[in-house]
Image: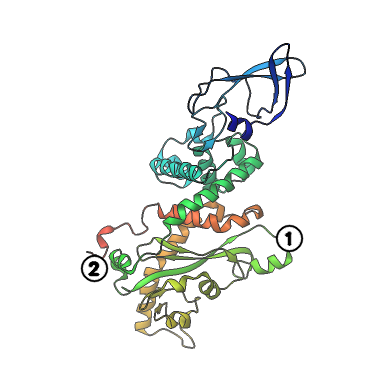
Amino acid sequence: MKELENGTSKFLKDEYDPSQKVSYRYILVFYRLKSPLRNQQQHISEPPVKKFKLCTQEKAIQVDLSVSKSMVDKGTQTYDVPRTLTVTDFIKTNAHLSSFCGLNTLEGFEKIAALIDEVLVQTQYGVVFVLDTREMLTLCLMKLKTGLPFSFLAPLFSISKKTCIKYFKIMIDIMYLITKNLIRWPTRREIMNTTPQCFHNYPNTRVILDCSEVYIEKLNCIDCRVKTYSFYYSGQTLKFLVGIASSGKIIFISRAYGGRASDKFITNDSGLLDLLEENDGVMVDKGFQIEEEVADRGCKIIQPPFLKDRDKFTPREGIENVDVARVRVHVERAIQRIKVFKILSTDLPRNLLHEADKILVVICGLVNLQSPIIADNDNFNKNDAD
């Protein structure tokens, strides 16, 4: 009870009347408290209910101050007040969850919520939340999936816009800790054991690379405008590098760069080349001019042939161009799944630019939880399987 008094209620002063032997305390009641709390069950070692008098100008109102298990669950602290329905209560099916949050199953949603509770306990997060864990997770995922403004999402959860932004940033920080483990650089043996038959001409392909960009709100800083201006998109953008394995899983995501950065600069600066091993194949588009950097590490670049000063490709180059395009398209499909999260398909707000790196990691982790891009498991090469 002392922790509750010190952490969640603000006692302004104590007054003691010896004749009445009653302690009067001024208590700050949160805005969601619409009626006095009565008959609340005690939790956490079942401490006895303490009764205080809330003094007003007209009369003293007696209330029961207690803590509820349902609101202090694995480190998440909120007040057990008459609960208001939120959009979370109306998500009943996997189809609803996929449309609102971008997850495929309710079971996966519950597992992520349980992991968030564990993170809150381990980090001893001391913030008092108005919403419970599942409501805050729904808020975060809805913002990522739908891209709706905070002013629209806030009424759906009966909170203010300022609180909505605060909860989103808290959830992004926690989701980043959880989902970053879903983007893992696999070993060469793991790559070989999950390589589809369509890569039979390129069996040593370790990673397929491509860059993508997202629009951002116009910045006030002139220097920032210059660094984020993209000639390809003719506007302010953030640019990032995506790497997938031959199986379609996202195995690398860079931090966000300004739209002015080139594909070559991002590839060299992101640290991806340091992950390669000798004889690895790196499949890229023509815009990645990293032949020398890849060759210095004993690896091979795989990209469509260049026409240069000729009028047309040779028959062999034409076939090679089609073969590379047929397998390289999978990285485009992975990026398409990333862009399904509408927060990256609309102008990213300025107040979220500092969270851009974490947002990218969270979305890529959620994409890896979805069904494989190449779903025909019978076409996987198992020759090297143990």
In this view, which residue lies farthest toward the top? 19
In-front residue for pair 270/44: 44
Specify which label sits upstream in the sequence, 1 or 2: 1
Name above or below for residue 359 compared with residue 19. below
Q: Quadrant of the C terminus?
A: bottom left
Which one is in front, 4 or 136?
A: 4
In the rendered image, is residue 67 in sight?
yes
Q: Residue at x 64, y 53 (%)?
A: 349
Q: Which residue is mark 1?
A: 220
- View extreme (bottom): residue: 309
Q: Quadrant of residue 250?
A: bottom left
Instruction: Name the amino acid type tagged 1.
Output: Asn
Left/right of residue 297 with respect to residue 126 in the rendered view: left
Q: Residue 188, percent across and down? A: 33, 69
Q: Which is more toward the observer, 276 or 202?
A: 276
Crowd around label 1: few <14 · some 14–19 · many ≥20 (10 Å)? few
**Up-down: is 130 above or below 147?**
above
Residue 236 is situated, as x and y percent measured from the top left of the image, at 64, 63
Residue at the disc numbered 2 = 384
Q: Residue at x 47, y 77 (%)?
A: 286
Q: Quadrant of the N terminus?
A: top right
**Identity of the residue drawn at 51% across and 43% down:** 120
